[in-house]
Image (cartoon, helix red, strand yellow):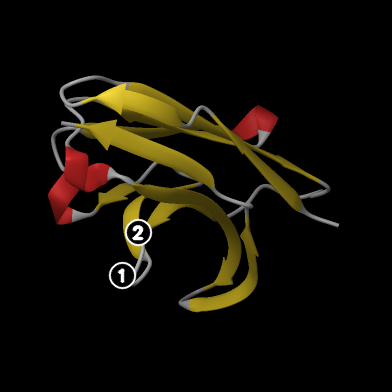
Amino acid sequence: QVQLVESGGGLVQAGGSLRLSCAASGSTFRFDAMGWYRQDLGKQRELVASITRGGITNYGDSVKGRFTISRDNAKNTVYLQMNALKPEDTAVYYCNARYTVGSLVTGDYWGQGTQVTVSS
């Protein structure tokens, strides 16, 4: 059974930094893509950043230039370095890992979420 365990959330002042980590267990194969999504109260879940097994990254427009995603394939772990945080970055951040065949998602897994709160 695949499990994703996030860590690193917390409270930080605007302009500060946080680093999120997500460790995957229970998977024999490396995930084709791993990433971070976030959801604030009353809003839809949105993509923050994703990274493929080959290292291709994709960022949401609101975090480009401030956040950096990386992964350690050997450890099946993905990281999100968040710099220059803003109050609007406040949300629950969810780790995601998936298997794909072409554009078809064949396995989709989520962590329990970690709260990030940015005070002004």
Q: Is residue 5 found left or right of 92 in the rendered image?
A: right
Instruction: Please provide percent x and percent y for residue 100.
Output: 57, 69
Relative horizontal placement of residue 23, taking residue 45 as reference (left or right): right
Q: What residue type is labelled 1?
A: Lys
The answer to whether residue 15 of the structure is visible from this angle is: yes
Residue plotted at (17% across, 36% down): 86
Binning the other alpha carbons within 10 Å of mark 1 as few (below 14), some (14 to 19) or many (20 upward) gives few
Query: Mark 1 near mark 2, Cβ–Cβ under 8 Å?
Result: yes
Badge 1 element: loop
Identify the secondary structure beneath mark 2.
loop
Instruction: Pick the residue in front: 89 or 5.
Output: 89
Q: Please give the label number shown on residue 60.
A: none
Residue 51 visible from this viewpoint:
no
Residue at left 18%, top 32%? 66
Q: Using the image, tell me which numbered label, if any, was put on residue 40.
A: 2
Mark 2 burial class by Cα count in 10 Å: few <14, some 14-19, many 20+: some
Name the residue: 19% across, 47% down: 88
Vertical position of residue 29 compared to residue 108: above or below: above
Looking at the rendering, which quadrant does residue 84 occupy? top left
Find residue 43 and name its label: 1
Vertical position of residue 110 compared to residue 56: above or below: below
- Expressed as whole percent of the image width and height from the top left, the position of residue 97 reads 58, 55
User: From what the image shows, is residue 70 above or below residue 29?
Assistant: above
Locate residue 56, reporting x and y percent. Answer: 35, 46
Residue shown at 27% from the left, 34% from the top: 118
- Distance, label 1 to label 2, CA atoms, is 5 Å
* Most foreground residue, 66 or 29: 66
Quick one: which residue is furthest to the top in this view? 16
Frontmost residue, 73 versus 35: 35
